[in-house]
Image (cartoon, rainbow, N blue to C red):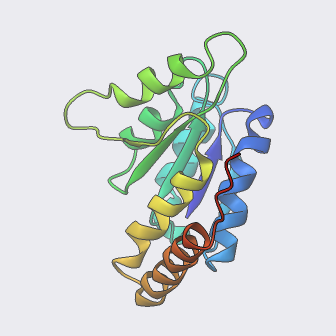
């Protein structure tokens, strides 16, 4: 799977996705490629992804956030857009850019800054092919369930 960020400043947000994917045992390529500053390199990377076995892309971008849509334009593999929070509009601009793809070029979109959800959606997609991921995902969810049920509530 590939995790692409438009800028090195996005790396702290996507680190959560990377760490969670590695916990599930998913091999992850991480690249910094910009839809605007390195369009040719981005195109080449995405178009050669099949040769490297990439099956899902997570594209993280802020502000104008064209990165996920450009990735989707060059592949038929699933693309998950991860809007990055920004200083002025808090990532709402990125969310709207990513979620408003034209018909025929879909990009799945998670919430602003929700890197863990991007990772989990990737695992869900990959689990359709890799049964061991489906089992790990069930275990992960069971752990979440147990944590909620074991939480104590004290109100005074």
Task: Tell me where residue 86 appears, x and y as whole percent.
Answer: 68, 20
Q: Which quarter of the rendered picture does the C terminus lie within?
A: top right
Question: Which residue is rendered at x = 32% and y = 28% of the image?
Answer: 101
Residue placed most toward the observer, 19 or 156: 156
Q: Is residue 31 above or below residue 20?
A: above
Asked whether, in this view, residue 115 is left or right of residue 69, the answer is right
The residue at the far left in this view is 103
Question: Which residue is rendered at x = 42% and y = 72% of the image?
Answer: 126
Q: Is residue 137 above or below residue 44?
A: below
Asked whether, in this view, residue 66 is left or right of residue 85, the answer is left
The residue at the far top in this view is 88
Question: Which residue is rendered at x = 45% and y = 81% of the image?
Answer: 138
Residue placed most toward the observer, 105 or 10: 10
Residue placed most toward the observer, 9 or 145: 145
Asked whether, in this view, residue 84 is left or right of residue 122, the answer is right
Asked whether, in this view, residue 43 is left or right of residue 85, the answer is left
Quarter occupied by residue 35: top right
Question: Which residue is rendered at x = 47% and y = 90% of the image?
Answer: 132
Number of marks:
0
Task: Tell me where residue 9 appears, x and y as whole percent.
Answer: 80, 32
Q: Which quarter of the rendered picture does the N terminus lie within?
A: bottom right
Residue placed most toward the observer, 14 or 44: 14
């Amino acid at each position: 799977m590939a995790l692409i960020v438009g800028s090195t400043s996005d790396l702290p947000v996507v680190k959560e996705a990377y760490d969670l994917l590695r916990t599930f045992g998913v091999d992850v390529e991480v690249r910094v490629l910009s839809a605007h500053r390195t369009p040719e390199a981005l195109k080449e990377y995405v178009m050669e992804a099949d040769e490297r076995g990439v099956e899902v892309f997570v594209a993280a971008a802020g502000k104008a956030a064209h990165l996920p849509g450009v990735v989707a334009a060059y592949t038929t593999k699933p693309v998950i857009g991860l809007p990055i929070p920004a200083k002025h509009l808090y990532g709402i601009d990125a969310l709207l850019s990513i979620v408003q793809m034209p018909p025929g070029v879909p990009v799945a979109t998670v919430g602003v800054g929700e890197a863990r959800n991007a990772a989990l959606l990737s695992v869900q997609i990959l689990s359709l092919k890799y049964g061991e991921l489906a089992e790990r995902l069930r275990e992960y969810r069971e752990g979440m369930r147990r944590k909620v049920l074991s939480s104590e509530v004290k109100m005074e």
